[in-house]
Amino acid sequence: MASFSKMGFEQHQLAYAHTSLYSPRGGAARIVADHSWGLKAWLNGKEVFRNDKRQVALGGYAALSRFELEHWTQSSSQFDVTLQPGWNRLLLKLSTPGPN
């Protein structure tokens, strides 16, 4: 999990986060991410997600079941990926907006 608490909310800022994910067998996985502005993601060098709009609802994984039980429509970004066996590289790019 990556945290960008020091990024701030100035216009035209970018932040990158890189992590490695290990999967013994590989296969399908779903990534759920809150982001206040733009988010782009690459897995093993291939773009797997792009959204330039705010998408915040989760706050924490404990809230997932409450969202389903109460039929909330607001949701965090979700995207499915296919992990390779062994180590996988995940790169995230977050941005703040420019002037409207």
Image: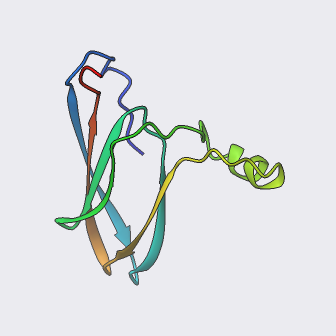
Give the residue drawn at x 59%, y 47%.
75
Report x, y in % for residue 54: 44, 36
Quadrant of the rendering where the C terminus is positioned: top left
- Residue 72 drawn above or below residue 78: above
- Residue 47 drawn above or below residue 18: below
- Residue 6 drawn above or below residue 49: above
Report x, y in % for residue 97: 28, 27
Residue 88, quarter of the rendered image:
bottom left
Residue 94 as seen in the image, left or right of residue 73: left
Residue 30 as seen in the image, left or right of residue 40: right
Residue 99 as seen in the image, left or right of residue 35: left
Give the residue drawn at x 32%, y 81%.
85
Report x, y in % for residue 96: 29, 28
Give the residue drawn at x 33%, y 39%.
38
Query: Is the image coloured rainbow, by chain, by secondary structure, or in one colour?
Result: rainbow
Report x, y in % for residue 79: 44, 63
- Farthest residue to the right: give it: 69
Count every numbered label the image shows and give the total: 0
- Farthest residue to the front: give it: 100
Quadrant of the rendering where the N terminus is positioned: top left
Residue situated in front as seen by the camera: 100 or 52: 100
